[in-house]
């Protein structure tokens, strides 16, 4: 699956600098289109060796809206500040021993490990990253911190025994944000259910309303926002037992 710029930046940061371990070094593909694949991690099973390869290509440039002005920027590099959530029996290795990531590069990351009994359950990954950019004249603009929290590692017992850690309602950070066409909403549910989700503008006017079926575990809801004018909006998700809201920006 190919997604837009913010997700490229976030997942590349996730991939680039978790560890310098080269024992599970992966080989980047030759994709010429900026993007990542896959967008979700496969399930891990207790006692079974696990490997998940994530491929990505960063774009060379992007644009950012500063008030009424659209500013073109060059992507210089990404730096991992810290991360949490990966179970102790797992590690992540990037394709380069130095784990250096530059704009325009192809790269990959390998998540490997063998889960123990006490690691069964749902593990949200949180990665704290800073993206460094320059203007088109090569002048550094600065670093932009962000948090990646749309990846989850689901560890299950191979025999089908229920997860040791019960799932809870949770809505992750939307991506890409800002977006111009489609918005993805990571969502965890402890049971099979239905959900309503609505988009309101900053004045509270309802701009979109949809209903969907959600499954137990991790879901990624999607909503087309191509017809929304530029601006800030809120999405509210409601189920019978849960309500959450989050802000996002539309930028065409």
Image: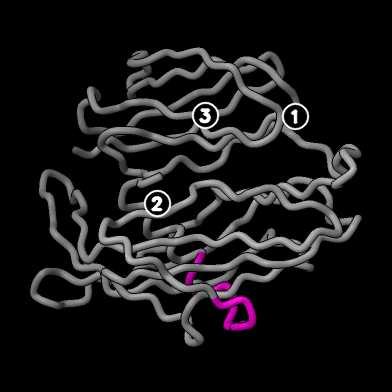
The image quarter containing residue 210 is: top left
Q: Is residue 146 magenta?
A: no
Q: Which mark is residue 7?
A: 2
Mark 2 burial class by Cα count in 10 Å: few <14, some 14-19, many 20+: many
Position of 1 relative to 219 (above/below): below
Q: Is residue 24 magenta?
A: yes
Relative to residue 191, is residue 223 drawn left or right? Answer: left
Query: Where is residue 7 drawn, in percent x and y?
Result: 40, 51
Q: How far apart, in angstroms, are the residues tagged by discs 3 and 2?
A: 20 Å
First in sequence: mark 3 vs mark 2: 2
Relative to residue 114, is residue 18 drawn left or right? Answer: left
Quarter of the image for the N terminus: give it. Answer: top left
The residue that disc 1 covers is: 190
Mark 3 burial class by Cα count in 10 Å: few <14, some 14-19, many 20+: few
- Picture mark count: 3
Which segment is the magenta one?
15-25
Main SS, magenta region, reads loop
Q: How far apart, in angstroms, are the residues tagged by discs 1 and 3?
A: 18 Å
Viewer-proximal residue among 198 and 175: 175
Please name the residue shown 68% across and 13% down the image: 240
Q: How far apart, in angstroms, are the residues tagged by discs 2 and 1?
A: 26 Å
Quarter of the image for the C terminus: give it. Answer: top left
Q: Secondary structure at mark 2?
A: helix
Q: Secondary structure at mark 1?
A: loop
Relative to residue 218, is residue 230 drawn left or right? Answer: left
Please name the residue shown 91% across and 39% down the image: 161
The residue that disc 3 covers is: 245
Query: Where is residue 51 drawn, in percent x and y?
Result: 65, 62
Query: Where is residue 211 drawn, in percent x and y?
Result: 51, 13
């Amino acid at each position: 699956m190919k997604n837009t710029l913010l997700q490229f930046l976030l997942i590349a940061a996730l991939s680039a600098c978790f560890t310098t371990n080269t024992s599970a070094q992966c080989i980047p593909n030759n994709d010429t289109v900026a993007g990542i694949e896959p967008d979700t991690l496969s399930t891990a099973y207790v006692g079974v060796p696990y490997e998940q390869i994530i491929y990505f290509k960063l774009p060379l440039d992007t644009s950012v809206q500063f008030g009424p002005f659209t500013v073109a920027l060059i992507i210089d590099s990404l730096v991992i500040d810290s991360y949490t959530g990966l179970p102790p029996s797992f590690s992540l290795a990037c394709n380069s021993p130095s784990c250096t990531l530059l704009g325009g590069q192809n790269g990959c990351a390998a998540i490997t490990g063998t889960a123990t009994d006490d690691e069964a359950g749902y593990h949200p990954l949180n990665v704290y990253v800073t993206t460094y950019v320059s203007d088109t004249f090569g002048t550094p603009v600065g670093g932009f911190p962000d948090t990646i929290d749309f990846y989850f590692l689901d560890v299950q017992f191979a025999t089908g025994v229920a997860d040791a850690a019960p799932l809870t309602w949770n809505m992750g950070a939307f991506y890409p944000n800002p977006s111009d066409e489609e918005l993805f909403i990571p969502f965890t549910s402890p049971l099979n259910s239905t959900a309503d989700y609505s988009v309101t503008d900053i004045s509270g006017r309802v701009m979109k309303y949809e209903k969907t079926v959600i499954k137990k575990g991790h879901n990624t809801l999607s909503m087309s926002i191509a017809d929304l004018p530029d601006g800030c909006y809120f999405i509210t998700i409601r189920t019978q037992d849960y309500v959450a809201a989050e802000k996002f920006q539309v930028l065409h």
